Image: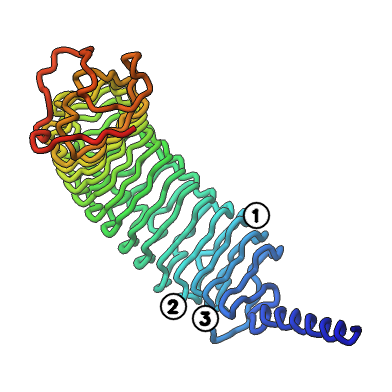
Amino acid sequence: MSDRRAILLLTCGALVTSLVTSFTHSCPTYHCYCFRGHEIDCVDMGLSEIPFFKVENKTYFQLDLGRNRIKRLAAYAFKNVRVRKIKVWRNRRSLDIHPKAFRGLEDVVRSIQVRGSRLRRLPRGLFKSLRQLRSIDLSKNHLETLHRGVFRDAHKVVSLNLADNSLAQLESDAFKGLDSLQLLSVDRNVIGHIDTKALRALRSLEELYLNDNKIRDLQPRSFKRLTNLRKLDLSHNEISAIFPPMFRGLAKLEILVLTGNPLMVLSDGALSAMSSLQELLLNKAKLTHIKAGMFRGLKSLRQLNLENNDIRALPDRVFRPLQSLEILHADNNALTTINACAFNSVERMREIWVTDNPIQCDCTLRWTSLASTAEIYGACASPKLVVDEEIALAHKYTVCIHTGMECSRPRYANKFHGLIVKY
């Protein structure tokens, strides 16, 4: 038995030695571990500077320097190591970066992440000659401004993340040089002003996130050069009025998010430049009414979100410009009925959501029994006999609370019979 135990201990010891050797074998620095032969792990090593790397002809996939106490990325800090992805995150001291910190990586580095490291400034020339660089993540730092020209050499970068910083404005030509950029995140800053020329270099941009800032006014033609933009998120800002010049140039935009803005004015035709728009989010926007002019030109819109407002009625033909509308979210408003006339000429409706509204289930809902293309989701608030019950087929309700109906049913109802009604 003792012999077996001795053999077992020797085997375990050899295995541990083998594992340790595999972690450190051929690692270009003694301060870190190497995994699978292509990742250098320096996380939580108490480093105050970038460690010395011995010269190798090998290319590593990733160098992770997270959770250290590094004060500075000095010039040529990575000159001896060939690595495609550099990560510096949750650094415990304010980090400073020399303009030539990444020199020596011109033909190899593809991704640079400096997140949560109390970075306060970006020096000009930082990304010079990094010909393979495709992604930059500078989120969760203390950046207060972007100096003109800081990205002038980042011609092939496709993704830039500047979220969770302290940027107060986007100045003219702030992103000059980012000719190939497709995704820009500047959300959760304190931006109050966007210069009309700040975004003009971003002709390849497809997604722009400006949500959770302090934007009050959108300058006319701020987005004019963003001719390839597909998604624009402006949610949770302080925008109170929208006029037609604000969104000129966005003919290819498919998703517009205006959630959480105090929209007092949404003028007629304000969104008409976005002929390709498919999804519009106006929820939590303090809207008290809507009218057809708001939706003029939105011939491709499929989903409209009006949740959590104070809308009291759906006016006649209000959705007439929305010929492609399929889904309407109008939950948690102040609607007392579902006006048949509102959906005149809307032939593709599939879902109408009106949960958490004070709906009166009376004879004015009779029109719903003539259509089979749409499902209505909601509950009755009155009469007392049907409180909290699902909105059933209108022929069950003979009481007429609402009067003065000029339109008895939407035009598209002539084509169908039997509306499926669900709660």
Secondary structure of the residue carrying numbered label 3? strand
Q: Nearer the viewer, residue 45 or 410?
A: 410
The three-letter amino acid code for the residue at tag 1 is Arg
Residue beneath the point at 58% across and 52% down? 118
Secondary structure of the residue carrying numbered label 2? loop
> Residue tagged by mark 3?
59
In which image quadrant can residue 331 be found? top left
Residue beneath the point at 16% across and 26% down? 367
Q: Earlier in the sequence, mark 2 or mark 3?
A: 3
Distance from the alpha carbon under mark 1 to that under mark 2: 30 Å
In which image quadrant can residue 25 be found? bottom right
Residue beneath the point at 47% across and 64% down? 126
In which image quadrant can residue 78 be found? bottom right
Distance from the alpha carbon under mark 3 to that under mark 1: 29 Å
- Say which mark, if any, is on residue 107: 2
Q: Nearer the viewer, residue 49 or 313?
A: 313
130 relative to 323 in the view: left or right: right
Q: Residues within 10 Å of mark 1 (few under 14, many from 20)?
A: some
11 relative to 193 in the view: left or right: right
Looking at this view, name the residue that lies furthest to the front: 396
Asked whether residue 157 appears in the rendered view, the answer is yes
